[in-house]
Every structure is written in C-alpha cells, then in structure tokens.
Amino acid sequence: MNADIASNALLEQRLALHPRVALRPEPFGALAYHYGNRKLIFLKDPDVVRVVQALADHDTLADTLRACDIDSSRWPSFERALTALTESEMLHERHQDPSG
C-alpha cells in the first residue's frame, strides 16, 4: 500500500485511547501504560499528549489535529507517532455510535 494512501486513511480514522491505557503527565510529556499488554511508552512531545487526550472528542484524527491547532506541516510526524501508538495497542479505532 502506498504510504500516502495509508497516511490519508489514518487521518480519517476515529481513534481513541484504549480503555486499558492510563496516561500519566510528566514534565517531558507523559507516560502511557497499557494494563492489558503491560507496555510502557514515553510520549515525549506535549503536543502529542494533547492530541491523544483529545482524540475521543473529535470525529477523525484530522479533526483532532485541527482542533489542537497543529500546523499541517507537522501532521506527517503526528501520523507516524499515532501509527506507532496504534500498533502498540495504546490507541484503537472507535466505531460509529449506532444511535448517531
């Protein structure tokens, strides 16, 4: 799959922090701990932390990046970071609420 297509697909996903993941704020950003798979990840950018915390409040990743005022020139680095968080099961795709 073309990287641009995969990237665009991620931007349109409805992502959220996995329910078994806890974020602990730290001066450098945050620690993310998954109580299911016991993975610990350092989020070293406060903007990434802000985006991760806001994911559930917006329809798509692109909407979240816009709402958090992330400059579009930085979106590729956020896509890479959130892809890694998804692959490590820290984030998961939310499904459309059947009621709305």
Image: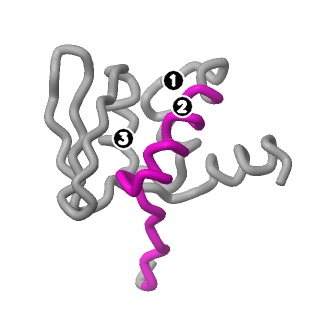
Q: Is residue 84 visible?
A: yes
Q: For this view, does 82 lie left or right of residue 37?
A: right
Q: Judging from the image, what secondary structure is the residue with disc 3 in? A: helix
Q: CA distance from mark 1 to mark 3?
A: 12 Å
Q: Are marks 2 and 1 in contact (CB under 8 Å)?
A: yes
Other-residue count near label 1 (Cα within 10 Å), few / some / many at <14 / 14–19 / ≥20: some
Spot occupied by residue 50 in the image (x, y as percentages of width and height): 33, 31
Spot occupied by residue 6 in the image (x, y as percentages of width and height): 73, 50
Question: Which stretch did the figure color magenta?
Answer: 76-98
Which residue is tagged 3?
Answer: 52
Question: Looking at this view, is 60 or 91 the one in front?
Answer: 91
Q: Are marks 1 and 3 in contact (CB under 8 Å)?
A: no
Q: Look at 49% across and 53% down and name the residue there.
A: 87
Give the mark nearer the N terminus: 2 vs 1: 1
Q: Look at 58% across and 37% down and name the residue there.
A: 79
Q: For this view, does 12 lie left or right of residue 83?
A: right
Q: CA distance from mark 2 to mark 3?
A: 10 Å
Label annotation for residue 78:
2
Q: State which quarter of the image contains the C terminus.
A: bottom left
Q: CA distance from mark 2 to mark 1?
A: 9 Å
Which residue is tagged 1?
Answer: 70
Give the answer, above or below, for where 58 lies relative to 49: below
Q: Look at 63% across and 50% down and name the residue there.
A: 10
Question: Looking at this view, is 14 or 63 the one in front?
Answer: 14
Give the answer, above or below, for where 98 lies relative to 71: below
Q: Nearer the viewer, mark 1 or mark 3?
A: 3
